[in-house]
Structures are given as C-alpha cells and as structure tokens.
Image (spheres, grey):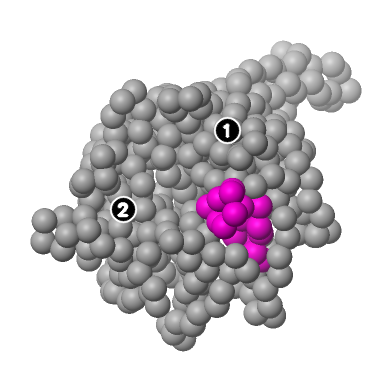
Amino acid sequence: MHSRILLLSLVITAPFHLLGKQQPTFGFTSEVTALKLVESTAALSQARLHFASTSVEKYALFAGGGNAAGLLQYSDVDIFDAHTAVWSTASLSQARSRLAGTSVGDYALFAGGSINNFIDGSRDSNDVDIFDAVTGLWSIATLSEARPDLAATSAGGYALFAGGSGRSSTVDIFDSLTRKWSTAELSQGRASPAATTVGDLAIFAGGSGSGNGFSSVVDIFDSRTGVWSTSTLSEGRVELQATSVGNYALIAGGRADNTGISDVVDIFDESTGLWSTANLSEKRTDLAATTVGNYAIFGGGGFGGGLTGSNVVDIFDANTGLWSTATLVKGRYLLSATSVGKYALFGGGFGDGMESAAIDIFALIPEPSTLLLSLTVFAALLHRRATR
C-alpha cells in the first residue's frame, strides 16, 4: 500500500537570547498546534461503516463493518504497523457489523455485532475474535449474550463490553490475566453508549435507554475495587463518542432529545471527581474520537437534517485546557478512530452518499522545547560563525 505524505507545519514562535545578544525570532504557523495531518492515499481494504477499531502494541486494527443499506457485512481486518507504517489484512471468524473493539494486555478483542447473509440469515452475534499481538495468532470466545450496538473499553486488566441492542444491561468482562469471563449489569439497559477509561475507571455514558430513549446515565466501574457507581451527563443523548486524556474523560456530540444534534462535551476530571462542560466547534453526531499524546481528538460526524458528513476535527490539549481545530480530507460520519504510537487514525465512514475507505492520519510532532533547543543550537552556530 502506497502513501503520499503532506505535512502541516508547527505553531511556535521562538524569541530567545543567546550569548547575551538578541537573536531573531523563528516563527512557524499552522491551524493545528503540535499535530500534523498526514494526507494519505492509504485506504481500508473495503469501504465501510459500523465497524470497530482498537490498538494493541504497535498495531492499529480496523475490523468488520457493513454497507449503508445494512445488507452486506464484512470480515475484513485492516492492520497498520506503527513501526514500519505498513498495512496488512486479516479476517474475523464471522463477517459482521455494529460490533465493538477494545484492547487489554497483549490482546485486541472484537465482540458482538449483527450478521446478515444468505447462509446464516439475519441474527445477532455473540462472537469474540481475539488477536494476540505477541504471537500474531487469532482465537475466539463468546459473549454471554448475543447483541450488536454494544460499547467497549478496558481498565486495569479487564476488557468490558457493555449494553447493546434491545437496551441490554449486560456487561461481559474479560480478565486478561486468567483469560476468564464474568458478567455484571449496567444500572440502566441501553444501546450504543459511549465508552472510555480514565485512570482505573471504565466509563459508559449515554446511549439509547428507557423513557424518551435519550439516556443521561453514566455507569462507572472501578477496576481497583470492582465497585460500580453512577453519575449523570449534562444532557441525555445518543450517537455520542468518548475518549480520555490525562485526568480527563471527554464525552462529546451526539443527538439530544430537546436540542437535536449536540455540540456538548461533558468532561469528567478523575483527579477531583468533578464534571464540567465545553462545546465542540460544530454540532454533530456519529463522530469518532481517539487520543494521541496529550491531545483528545474528535473527528468527523454528521450535521443537518439529512446528515451531511463533517470534516471538522476538534482537538483538546490536556496540558493547556485549550481547544483547536483541524480538518479531515473528506467529511464523513459513522467513521472509526484509534491511536497507536505517535499516530491517530480516522478511517471509513459515510460521506457524499457513499461508503468511504479513506484514512486520515494525524501524527505528533516534536515537542516545542525539543525544537527550540535545536533552533537555539542552530542560532548559536550562526552567531559563532558571524563573530569569527
């Protein structure tokens, strides 16, 4: 797979003094601070939506999915090696869409989903495909309950798969040390909650629940104690996404009951236990989220009555608490995102009336202090040469 790389420049203004004399300012500008967008011709092996992604060791994996009509499901697994930047492929044990993925220890797990083919007909899946990053081998397990539209995250040594279609309250828990499974229950059954982990806490927020269907419930699992607790979002919503960075869990976007498509970001500070809110630069639903370095990234999504694919990327810097924006190469929603090494990858989705195989890759750049040191050395050499 070939790729063409176009790099964005860095935002730094670097006035400094050397050897007691004023040195010139070196200025660099960009829309994105400390990230660069890799505009790549790399693509998924199959254009698709409703798929899952996760990362383990040096690998980013994009698995399963289907077409917009829901009539086709895929078993394709696209695997990106962050060390070599080379792509390869594998296959799930069963083609399916609307599955969930997460990683724990050396394992990447893809669980549940919806199957629709001429042989098996239409049914929910309880399959779990497990990739061992050390051996490169795949194995299979089963959930306690077959279901699509579940959410997944990992905390401590546990991988958790929660909720699902039919407003399931089931949580299947995989212990990576013993490779044994157990179950728990959400406080409210719901489909498609957003999931993320901050510190030792696994968080399942919002989703399609009982009542008006727009849940504001947050279920929190403490992997140290095994105890569950609850909290509440600022507004109930579905089709939202979550990621974590530093001490913060961020739960963004989606569709709310009273306000329609939402720009709300609920932010939980794990160090204090307090909640606050912020806003995305654009209201959107069915977006994707991931984290690289100290940046939480929310990309794409749909906006408008008939859902138009957005190319907006909102970036939260946990070090400064500031937000910035960038853009995807192509606007789309129902995409999936994951991060590995210095890379954040946004793949697939639906835009311009068709399924997409596009992959947008953001990469961390050297920290400003590192670059300033290089500039300092360079300026010192210039000064020494000028004074000889």
Position of the C terminus by quadrant: top right
Q: Decide if residue 5 is in sight here.
A: no
Q: What SS does tag 1 mark?
A: strand
Q: Judge by depth and name the residue closer to the eye, 44 or 141.
A: 141
Q: Label 1 sits on what residue type?
A: Ile
Q: Label 2 sits on what residue type?
A: Ser
Furthest-right residue in view? 20
Q: Judge by depth and name the residue closer to the eye, 79 or 307.
A: 307
Q: Which mark is residue 97?
A: 2
Determine whether, in the image, residue 156 is placed left or right of residue 87.
right
Count the labels in the image.
Answer: 2
Q: Position of residue 379 (x, y in %)?
A: 70, 22
Mark 2 or mark 1: whose residue is earlier in sequence: 2
Residue ID at (72%, 13%): 386
Q: Position of residue 161 (x, y in %)?
A: 48, 67
Vertical arrangement, residue 244 with respect to residue 136, above or below: above
Boundaries of the magenta span = 203-220
Q: Judge by depth and name the residue closer to the eye, 211 or 145.
A: 211
Q: Disc 1 designates what residue?
A: 261
